Amino acid sequence: MSESQQIKAHKVAAFILAFLTCLTVCPQDLQAEGKSTEELAKAAQNPIADLISLPLQNNTNFGVGPGNDAQNVLNIQPVIPFELGTNWNLITRTIAPLIYQPELLPGTGSEFGLGDINTTLFLSPAKPGKLIWGLGPVFSFPTASDRVLGTDKWSAGPSAVALTIRGPWVVGALANNLWSYAGDDDREDVNQFLMQYFINYNLPEGWYISSAPIITANWKADSGNKWTVPFGGGIGKIFRIGKQPMNAQVQAFYNVAKPDNGPDWTLRLQLQFLFPK
């Protein structure tokens, strides 16, 4: 391992240690806020819960490109539900990515900026049964600040989510597919699939074990470069800063399948602000 790689590894280790220390020392009792720790944990793990939240999800991808560089993507992901009468909810989920892109081709340089913003609208029953579900459209907008950070295409498609909550378990999956319909004619058309399954097991005092990898497929790519399939998981905790409920987690994933220039593995750190009713 080179000296620069050792420095990066030490910084990552120090950050993880500080992150986990914060989880351990923060207050645990959220009963005074009207929702138990367990209720908040399960709501935070439900993508279509009737709960306003602001997740800040940082994904550091290692081994990107021919130089085995690190790419960083900070996803700002506000989730805002709306009541549509007494029977239905509309849950809006937006992802605004801030991307550091390392140099992938000699002479192109690295870039940092805003990527394409993605918004999903889920229509979901206000009083679901054992199966909780939501359906709706997903949109991607060409908001990237540099062409290497986005597609230069307007895209849309269907999205669906389904999950169940059984005792300490929260298990489900979310999937969508985007097709481009307008944008720069010189750029490749978009036909991209995404699926995220999530398995959570809740423990006492707000701790939980989680696995929520994001599987993607670029249907326009060559056969050996279509899929990115990560495998892994991590831990998380519900805690409070003052009166503000928070959810934090750390997960790591190894890509068992990836495109030629795709990352070998990913470290995900997430901090989520919760605003229960």
Image (cartoon, rainbow, N blue to C red):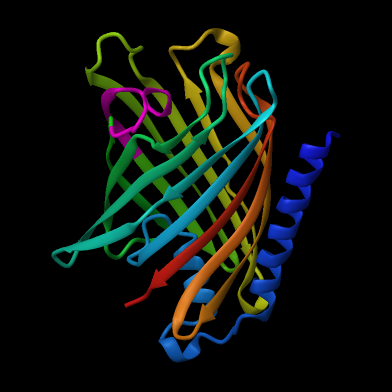
- Write the residue at 58% across / 27% down: 228
Can the viewer see residue 59? Answer: yes
Task: Name the quadrant of the C terminus.
Answer: bottom left
Q: Position of residue 200 (x, y in %)?
A: 60, 58
Asked whether residue 80 is drawn in magenta, I would say: no
Residue 178 rendering spot, x and y as whole percentages: 34, 27
Residue 244 x %, y %: 44, 79
Please name whichever residue, 187 or 156, is drawn nearer the observer in this view of the structure. 187
Tell me what residue is drawn at x 50 percent, y 67 percent: 42
The stretch drawn in magenta includes residue 145: yes
State the image quarter where residue 177 is shown.
Answer: top left
The residue lying furthest to the right in this view is 1
Q: Residue 156: x and y, percent?
A: 26, 29
In the image: residue 42, left or right of residue 88? right
Q: Is residue 162 above or below residue 70?
A: below
Quadrant for the N terminus in the image: top right
State which quadrant residue 97 falls in: top left
Q: Nearer the viewer, residue 126 or 78?
A: 78
Q: Which residues are the magenta region? A: 143-159
Q: Name the residue at the bottom extreme.
A: 32
Q: How many marks?
A: 0
Q: Residue furthest left?
A: 85
The answer to whether residue 130 is seen in the rendering is no
User: In the drawing, does residue 203 fall left or right of residue 113?
Assistant: right
Q: Residue visible at 56% across and 22% down?
A: 227
Q: Residue at x 30, y 65 (%)?
A: 127
